[in-house]
Image (tube, rainbow, N blue to C red):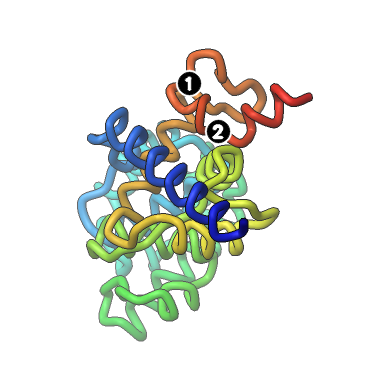
Amino acid sequence: MDNAMDSNDRKNHRKILELLEQHYAGAVSALNFTNPFEQLIATMLSAQCTDRQVNKVTAGLFQEYPGPREMAALTPEELGQKIHSCGFYRTKSKNIIQTCKILMQQYGGRVPDNMESLTSLPGVGRKTANVVLSNSFGKDAIAVDTHVFRVSNRLGLADADNVRDTEKQLMENIPKKKWSRAHHWLIYHGRRVCKARKPDCENCFLQSLCKYRRNQEEK
C-alpha cells in the first residue's frame, strides 16, 4: 500500500510540475540586478519587503555604490537612510555593510559561489544563498521563501511545518534540473493564485491535484 501511495504521490508531483511549467514557463526573478553582488544585496533587502519597493531603492543605490568597496565605506546610519523604505533598515544596513567588508577582506570583492561561504555572511540565510547560487551562478538550488513554503505545502509537494524541512522535501520531490525554475513557478503561483489569505481555488488550474483543496472539500 505504501509503495502504491508513493507511486501516486510521484505521479501527482509530476503532473503539478508539468502544469506549473506550462503556465509559468517564462518566470524569472522580480528583483533587478546585473551581477552577483547586486543580487545579494537586493535579496537581503527583500526580507519583509516587496520586490517592487526593493527595485525602487536599488535603482539609485547601485548607481551610487556599485560594489562592496563603495558600500563598505558607508556608516550604518548613512546606508539606513537610503534603504529606510525597505523596512528593518537598521538591521539590514549593519548586515550589508559588514557583509561588504567581509567580501573585500576575504573574497577579493567577489561574492562566493558556495552555500557555506554565503551563509557565513551576516544576514544571509539559506534562502538568500540559494537565490544567489541559482540566479547568479546557474547552480541547481531551490530557495524557500514565504510563497514557496505556503504553495508547496498546500499543493502537497511538501508536507512540513518549517522552511528547512520543506526545502529538503522539495529537493527530493522535484528533479534536480528543475529546482531553480520550480522556485520561480511556485512564487508566481503564490502571487497570482494561491495567495496567503484567500487562495483562488475556484480558478486554479491545479485544484484537481491540490491537497489543500481536497482537505477543504472534505471539511
- Residue on which disc 1 sits: 204
Q: Earlier in the sequence, mark 2 or mark 1?
A: 1
Farthest residue in the front direction? 1
Residue drawn 45% across the image and 24% down it:
192
Compared with 70, 9 (above or below) is above
Label total for image: 2
Element type where label 1 sits in the image: loop
Give the residue type that dot 1 points to.
Cys
Q: Residue at x 30, y 39 (%)?
A: 59
Q: CA distance from mark 2 to mark 1?
A: 9 Å
Tag of residue 214: none
Q: Closer to the observer: label 2 or label 1?
A: 2
Query: Which residue is labeled 2 in the image?
Result: 210
Looking at the rendered structure, the kind of residue marked 2 is Cys
Q: Residues within 10 Å of mark 2 (few under 14, many from 20)?
A: many
Residue 137 or residue 9, whichever sits in front: 9
Where residue 86 appears, as percent x and y from the top left, is 52, 41
Residue 47, x across and y down, in percent: 54, 48
**For the residue carrying disc 1, how many other residues have a C-alpha within 10 Å: few (<14), some (14-19), or many (20+)?**
some
Q: Do the residues bearing badges 2 and 1 touch, measured as CB atoms within 8 Å?
A: yes
Q: Does any portion of residue 78 appear in the rendered image?
A: no
- Up the image or down, 124 lies above or below 217; here it is below
Q: Residue at x 78, y 24 (%)?
A: 219
